[in-house]
Structure formats: C-alpha cells, structure tokens
Image (cartoon, rainbow, N blue to C red):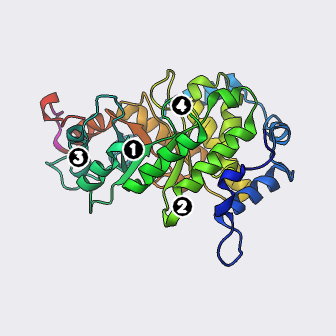
Amino acid sequence: MTASVSSATSDARTGADGSSSDTEKVLARARDVVGATELDDTNLARYLHGLPGVDKVGADGRAAMLGTRSIKTTAKQWALDTIVSMIDLTTLEGADTPGKVRTLAAKARTPDPSDPSCPRPAAVCVYGDLVHVAKDALAGTGVKIAAVATAFPSGRASLDVRLADTREAVAQGADEIDMVIDRGAFLAGQYSKVFEDIVAVREACRADGAQAHLKVILETGELATYDNVRRASWLAMLAGADFIKTSTGKVQPAATLPVTILMLEAVRDFRELTGTQVGVKPAGGISSSKDAIKYLVAVNETLGEDWLNPDWFRFGASSLLNDVLMQRSKMRTGHYWGPDYVTVS
C-alpha cells in the first residue's frame, strides 16, 4: 500500500498559480493531526488506535438517558419543522423509475399541500442515473439533489469504476455525493487505502469547477465495535469528508442513537482540534417523529445549536416525512390525518 494519496489523483493538487489546492490542504491537515509526514497504514493505525476507547455501557446509557427527554408545545412544533428541513428524502431501490423519482420530487416540492408554511426537505437522494430526473423536477426549489455513488451499497469495485460513478452523478447535476467506504479494507487495517479512496472521490466531487459535497457512509452495522465507529469517523474526516453518515439502509442495524452520538462526539472533537466543522447523517430505520426528536436532543446536548440546521445534520429516510407531517397536522388541527391523506413516498 502506498504511503500517500495515489498518483491517479495527483494532477489536480496544485492550482494554476502554484498555490496548494483544496486536496493538498486536506492532506496537510491530516499530516498535522496524525503527526507524521507519511499517511501510511502504520501511521494512521498508530493515530486511530490511540484514540480513547469507547465505554459501550456508558455510551448506551447516555443514549437511553437522552431518549427520555420530553419536548412539547412550541418546542415540539419547532422540532417537527426542523426535522422536515433536515430530511434527505430517499429512494434507493432496484425498481426505481423516473416516474417514482418525479413523485418523490413532487412530495419534496410540496410536502403538505394544505399548509404552505411547511418547510421543504433538505434533499432528494437517488441513484446516480436518475439525478437528471430529480434535478429537472426540483428546479428552482432549493432542494438539493444527492446521489449515492462508488458502487453503492457494497463499495466493492475498482477505484476507477467508483470514480466514474461519482463523476457521472456530478455531471448530471448532483449537489451531494453519498459514497460508501470499503469496509473490508477498513476491517483489515488498510487505513491508507480507505483514506486514499475518500480523497480521490472528494476530488471527483470538485473537479472542473463542481462543488458537490461529500457524505461518507461508514456502514456502522458492519464495523462490529464502537471503537471502530470512532476510528472510521476520524479517518473519514481526516480525508476531507463534508459529512459522515451512519449507514446505507441496506444493512442491519442501520442508524442507532448510541452510534450517532459517538459520531457527534467525533465531529465535536475534530472541530475543537482542527477548526473544521463536519456534518452528521444518521440513515436507515428512523421512521417516527418521536425517534427523530431524540436525535435532535442528542445533537443539541452534544454539539449545541451550531449543528441544528440542515447544513450540518441530516436524516436519511423514506417514511419519516409521512409521520412528521401527520404530527404537524395533529398539532395544527387537533386531529390526525388518515393514511389516505399522506402522499406516497
């Protein structure tokens, strides 16, 4: 394994004026944090395995405690609107069609036709080949288009294939790329390979003047331990992730509150150390407003108000929006919608 980022991505590192590119800044920061000139497996392992270990009992207990907080009246109204604004409304099925994506986009454009004050979701998330459909359907709304890439959900493809996947989605107009790490490489201790992959995909997100944000999916359900979740979070941030994301939604367990709190703590500590703020996205299995509010409480308690907006916290979900809309209607009208009043997700 090479000691630094592969030569395949080196051409874009120096600007026309000879100044350091965005990638070189990421690498310089990583070297400074790790305390080594070479970002190889040995030095990355030394740093990542030197992070404080996670007390699993304590982490689970903290999550359970935060989950008991009660939010009512105007605070609940604010929370429900905030949750809607943080949702990446998602369809990632093999049977997805342009028609289904247009239906989802229509829901994002007007989540509650009976209430014009209802905010729109942050983004619609689709496979890369359907980005152009979502882009056309959401033109002028401010709703972002996110695309999964890099051989989602397994990530098991050559780097060239994964980069081509990313470039195609960006070329079609994706504002955000949700990539998956190679969990096999991570679990085998090939940290420099995972690091290099993220750096290369980040460059593809920003090539030719594009500015797509990069969300790095850790697939925490396959990482086996809380210590690995912490290490993978730091590795992704060192490589320049704009967001770290729990899951693809295709592996169980997907998002859990204890794991998300670990990731929130990681981005907090990373900002304290480097001054760089990174977002967090739990995805998969969050389907009720009651559960989503627990995540908002965790964000507020762990990070504070800085992260309580869609620029820094998202929910990856397909059915969550329906439940939140029903809860909003209950607070506004005094009664629940029947299921026939909820648009298809």
Residue 156 sits in which quadrant?
A: top right
Q: Is 22 situated above or below 261? A: below
Q: Which amino acid does label 3 sit on?
A: Pro
Q: Which mark is on residue 257?
A: 4
Classify mark 2: residues with Cα within 10 Å, few (<14), some (14-19) or many (20+).
some
- Select label 4 or label 3 by which is in front: 3
Q: Earlier in the sequence, mark 1 or mark 3?
A: 3
Q: Is residue 24 magenta?
A: no
| CA distance for labels 1 and 2 | 17 Å
Q: Are the residues flagged by discs 1 and 2 in contact, CB closer than 8 Å?
A: no
Q: Which of marks 4 and 2 is nearer the N terminus?
A: 2
Residue annotated with mark 2: 207
Q: Residue at x 55, y 54 (%)?
A: 204
Residue 131 seen by the camera: yes
- Select label 4 or label 1 by which is in front: 1
Q: Which of 1 and 276 is in front in this view?
A: 1
Q: Which of marks 1 and 2 is nearer the N terminus?
A: 1
Residue annotated with mark 1: 128
- Select label 2 or label 3 by which is in front: 2
Could you tell me which secondary element the residue under label 3 belongs to?
Answer: loop
Q: Does the magenta stretch include residue 335?
A: yes
Q: Which mark is on residue 111?
A: 3
Q: Is 17 situated above or below 218? A: below
Q: What residue type is labelled 2?
A: Ala
- Select label 4 or label 2 by which is in front: 2
Q: Earlier in the sequence, mark 4 or mark 3?
A: 3
Q: Is the magenta stretch mostly helix, strand or loop?
A: loop
Q: What residue type is labelled 1?
A: Gly
